[in-house]
Image: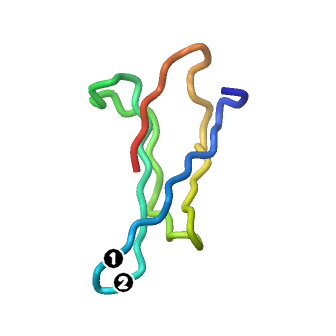
Amino acid sequence: MQTLQPELAVENSVDPDGDALVYEYEVYADAGMQQLQLGSPSVPEGDAITSWTAGADLPDNAWHWWRA
């Protein structure tokens, strides 16, 4: 990773009712996703991709796991 504050992105999902969706991102220090390092506020969906840039530096030279 070239930055300690990466941009995380997902392809938008589709709501069966056509409602607008929001996404929340979580970054973890462990594969079991038990040690939360960062979390986003609710992010409104973009056109086809929704992204969020980490608002704080992640630890350097370490593995990170994330989900939205």
Above or below, comparing residue 41 to residue 46 in the picture = above
Residue type at mark 1: give it.
Asp
- 37 to the left or right of 17: right
Residue type at mark 2: give it.
Asp
- 2 to the left or right of 58: right
Q: Residue at x 63, y 39 (%)?
A: 6
Q: Residue at x 66, y 26 (%)?
A: 1
- 12 to the left or right of 30: right
Mark 1 element type: loop
Question: Where does the image place residue 35, in percent across and percent down from the top left?
Answer: 33, 27
Mark 2 element type: loop
| Quarter residue 23 falls in | bottom left
Q: Which mark is residue 15?
A: 1
Q: Residue at x 55, y 51 (%)?
A: 9
Question: Where does the image place residue 19, in percent across and percent down from the top left?
Answer: 36, 83
Q: Residues within 10 Å of mark 2 (few under 14, many from 20)?
A: few
Q: Which mark is residue 19?
A: 2
- Answer yes or no: do the residues labelled 2 and 1 have beta carbons within 8 Å? yes
Question: Where does the image place residue 42, in percent across and percent down from the top left?
Answer: 44, 63
Q: CA distance from mark 2 to mark 1?
A: 6 Å
Q: Residues within 10 Å of mark 1 (few under 14, many from 20)?
A: few
Above or below, comparing residue 48 to residue 65 in the picture = below
Question: Which residue is more in the foreground, 44 or 41?
Answer: 44
Labels in figure, total: 2
Q: Nearer the viewer, mark 2 or mark 1?
A: 1
Above or below, comparing residue 66 to residue 19 in the picture = above
Above or below, comparing residue 14 to residue 32 in the picture = below
Q: Residue at x 65, y 37 (%)?
A: 5
Q: How is the image coloured?
A: rainbow
